[in-house]
Image (cartoon, grey):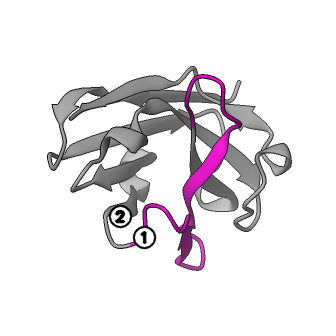
């Protein structure tokens, strides 16, 4: 059974940092691309970042470029999202998602989802 479990969310002041983790199980980690999406109340789900550790490719949404960094630890089957210089507009529930093969920007391209972790950035 494929499982994705997010952790690391919380409340932080603007300018602060958080590191989210997505622990994966039930599939061959190297064969899957892992992405982070976020959804704020009343807004559509937005792609934040994704990584395909098999070939090292990654990408970022325009709103987080230069502030967020995605990485993976294949030995731990875990993907991290380091979020620096957080802004109030980063407030959302953050989800990790997985799909077979390479990275994709659309949420509809991902087959497996975690339960989400809340990130709240106060001004």
Which residue is found at the position 16% from the left and 50% from the top? Answer: 15
- Residue bearing the label numbered 1: 65
Residues at marks 1 and 2 touching, judged by CB atoms closer than 8 Å: no
Q: Is residue 2 left or right of residue 24?
A: right
Q: Considering depth in this image, is 34 or 11 the residue closer to the camera?
A: 11
Q: Considering depth in this image, is 2 or 50 the residue closer to the camera?
A: 50
- From the top left corner, tell me how far across and down residue 89 is, in percent: 41, 42
Query: Hey, which quadrant is residue 50 in on the image?
Result: bottom right
Which residue is found at the position 84% from the left and 50% from the top? Answer: 109
- Residue bearing the label numbered 2: 69
- Assess disc 2: are there few (<14), some (14-19) or many (≥20) residues with their C-alpha within 10 Å of its C-alpha: some
- From the top left corner, tell me how far across and down residue 12 is, in percent: 18, 32
Which marked residue is nearer to the observer: mark 1 or mark 2?
Answer: 1
Q: State yes or no: residue 95 in magenta.
A: no
**Image mark for residue 112:** none
Which region is colored magenta? 39-65
User: How far is mark 1 from mark 2, CA to CA?
Assistant: 8 Å
Q: Is residue 61 left or right of residue 20?
A: right
Q: Considering depth in this image, is 30 or 85 the residue closer to the camera?
A: 85
Which residue is found at the position 37% from the left and 50% from the top? Answer: 80
Query: Hey, which quadrant is residue 85 in on the image?
Result: bottom left
Q: Quadrant of the N terminus?
A: top right
The kind of secondary structure element at disc 1 is loop
Q: Is residue 87 left or right of residue 85?
A: right
Q: Quadrant of the C terminus?
A: top left
Above/below status of 89 relative to 32:
above
Q: Is residue 12 left or right of residue 88?
A: left
Above/below status of 23 relative to 52:
above
The kind of secondary structure element at disc 2 is strand
- From the top left corner, tell me how far across and down residue 93 is, in percent: 50, 27
Pick out the residue farthest to the front: 123
């Amino acid at each position: 059974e494929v499982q994705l479990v997010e952790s690391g969310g919380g409340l932080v002041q603007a300018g602060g940092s958080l590191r989210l983790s997505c622990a994966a199980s039930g599939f061959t980690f190297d064969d899957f691309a892992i992405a982070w999406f976020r959804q704020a109340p009343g807004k559509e789900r937005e792609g934040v970042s994704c990584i395909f550790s098999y070939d090292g490719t990654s990408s970022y949404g325009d709103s987080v470029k230069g502030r967020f960094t995605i990485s993976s630890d294949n030995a731990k089957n875990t993907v991290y999202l380091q979020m620096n210089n957080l802004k109030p507009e980063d407030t959302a529930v953050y989800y990790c998602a997985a799909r077979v093969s390479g990275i994709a920007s659309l949420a509809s391209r991902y087959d497996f989802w975690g339960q989400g972790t809340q990130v709240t950035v106060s001004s």
